[in-house]
Amino acid sequence: MRYFGMAAASAAALMLGGCVREARIALPSELAASVEELGIDGMGGWRRGTFTLAGAPGEFTRGADRLQILDDLLVSNTGAGTFRYANLQGACRYREREVNVGVISARARPFSYRCLFSRNGALAGELVIEEERGTLGSMLSKRGREGFMLFDGVRYEVKSIHRDQGGGLANATPLGYRFDSAGRSFGAVDLNGTNKTLFAPRAGAAREAVFAGGLALSVLWDPAVINP
């Protein structure tokens, strides 16, 4: 319920003040010039429904559960999401567990997210994202994520984006994710606002890979955002 309250408050601020700007991911100039910007329209804050991407329809489901034991001593977050778009399907799950003693909080099980992709019923790949551990950012409560995606036999690196294109300090929680290959970014997904945005190659196999990874990350109800 807290998630929907935050969304309603943000919408009210936009309507009343007219000056509240949603954060948008900062993209390298060379990436921004080489990709097509595509909105994922229709997901909003709903648990299930339909969306439109690149003029084609899709369907999605998602959910999140929070279990608290002995007040907030042990908190377990789990969730799942699915999508269907053209002949591509995705099924995703996440989990994390934290222990809270007074003002001290520690991740007993850091966030992990895994999705399986299929095409016409046959396995097409997977996405694996995990929370960074042991880095300076993680020690300062930055919830950085990194991982990989295998799609049609090709491996891509995936890393969270925390900087807003407007500048300023890095956001503690991910604003989006970028997709890298051979040390260079070729695509990204912006997860802010009611509708998500893909930055995909204009053609080639990597375009469908960004569609798959971007949709998988768009159906995630991130516990770092729902329960900051």
Image (cartoon, helix red, strand yellow):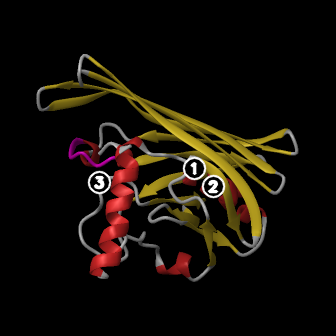
Q: Is mark 3 in CB contact (under 8 Å) with mark 2?
A: no
Q: Calculate the distance from the C-alpha at mark 1 to the C-alpha at mark 2.
A: 6 Å
Of the residues shown, which amino acid type is indicated by label 1? Val
Question: Circle 3 is placed at which residue position?
Answer: 172
Residue at the image point whose x is 63% and y is 55% from the top: 215
Tell me whether the residue at label 1 lies in contact with that at label 3, contact meaning CB atoms closer than 8 angstroms: no
Q: Please tell me whether mark 3 or mark 2 is closer to you in this view.
A: 2
The percent position of residue 50, horizontal first and vertical second, equals: 68, 57
Label 3 vs 2, first from the N-terminus: 3
Q: In which quarter of the image is the N terminus?
A: top left
Q: Overall secondary structure of the magenta stretch? A: loop
Res 163 seen here: no
- Determine whether 226 is above or below 40 in the image: above
Residue at image coords 48%, 46%: 221
Extent of the magenta region: 139-144
The picture places residue 132, in percent across and down from the top left corner, at: 38, 41
Question: Is 151 left or right of 138, judged from the image as shown?
Answer: right
| Residue 30 painted magenta | no
Label 1–label 2 contact, CB within 8 A: yes
Residue 4: image location, x then y, percent: 40, 51
Left or right: where 29 falls relative to 53: left
Question: Which of pointers 1 and 3 lies earlier in the amino acid sequence?
Answer: 3
Query: Which residue was labeled with disc 2?
Result: 215
Q: How many marks?
A: 3
Q: Residue 154: which disc?
A: none
Q: Element under label 1?
A: loop
Residue 219 circle label: 1
Residue 207 seen in this snapshot: yes
Q: Residue furthest top?
A: 70
Q: What residue type is labelled 3?
A: Ala
